[in-house]
Amino acid sequence: MKTISAKQVEEKLNKGEQLNIIDVRETHEVAFGKIPSAVNIPLGLIEFRMQDLDKSKEYIMVCRSGARSSQACRFLESYGFNVTNMTGGMMSWEGEVEA
């Protein structure tokens, strides 16, 4: 499984790179703040929302600590998606957040 640090994600966003970030936390967790531009798809709904994802794009998966996002990565990888896990999750995120 590919990984990326929270700092690397922040640096890419600060350079203006367009990233496809999926936050797999529950909606009540995301209400406290998420990475700007991240799309919330709770882990339990990933299976049902796969048709909304594009296999030609790369996705960065995020959760609170990195555990649920690694589960999402393994699941989506098994279906041929190009996914990367953000290690440390939002607990490691020092960048801007939006409510």
Image (spheres, helix red, strand yellow):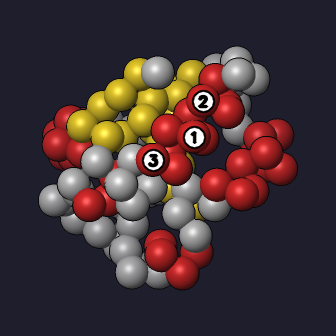
- Residue position marked by numbered label 1 in the rendering: 71
In the displayed structure, does residue 44 sit left or right of residue 70? right
Query: Would you call the spot at circle 1 few (<14 residues within 10 Å), some (14-19), or many (20 or more)?
Result: some
Residue 54: image location, x then y, percent:
69, 31
Camera-nearest residue between 53 and 44: 44
Residue 10: image location, x then y, percent:
22, 46
Give the residue at x 16% y 59%. Answer: 94
On residue 97, the disc is: none
**Could you say whether the residue bearing mark 3 is in a helix, strand or loop?**
helix
**Could you say whether the residue bearing mark 2 is in a helix, strand or loop?**
helix
Residue 21: image location, x then y, percent:
47, 46
Q: CA distance from mark 1 to mark 2?
A: 5 Å
- The answer to whether marks 2 and 3 mark residues whose Cβ atoms lie closer than 8 Å is no
Q: CA distance from mark 2 to mark 3?
A: 11 Å
- The answer to whether marks 3 and 1 mark residues whose Cβ atoms lie closer than 8 Å is yes
Give the residue at x 22% y 64%. Answer: 96
Query: Would you call the spot at circle 2 few (<14 residues within 10 Å), some (14-19), or many (20 or more)?
Result: some
Res 88 seen here: yes
Vertically, is 33 above or below 44? below
- Residue position marked by numbered label 3 in the rendering: 67
- Residue position marked by numbered label 2 in the rendering: 74
Give the residue at x 79% y 45%. Answer: 47
Q: Mark 3 belongs to which amino acid?
A: Ala
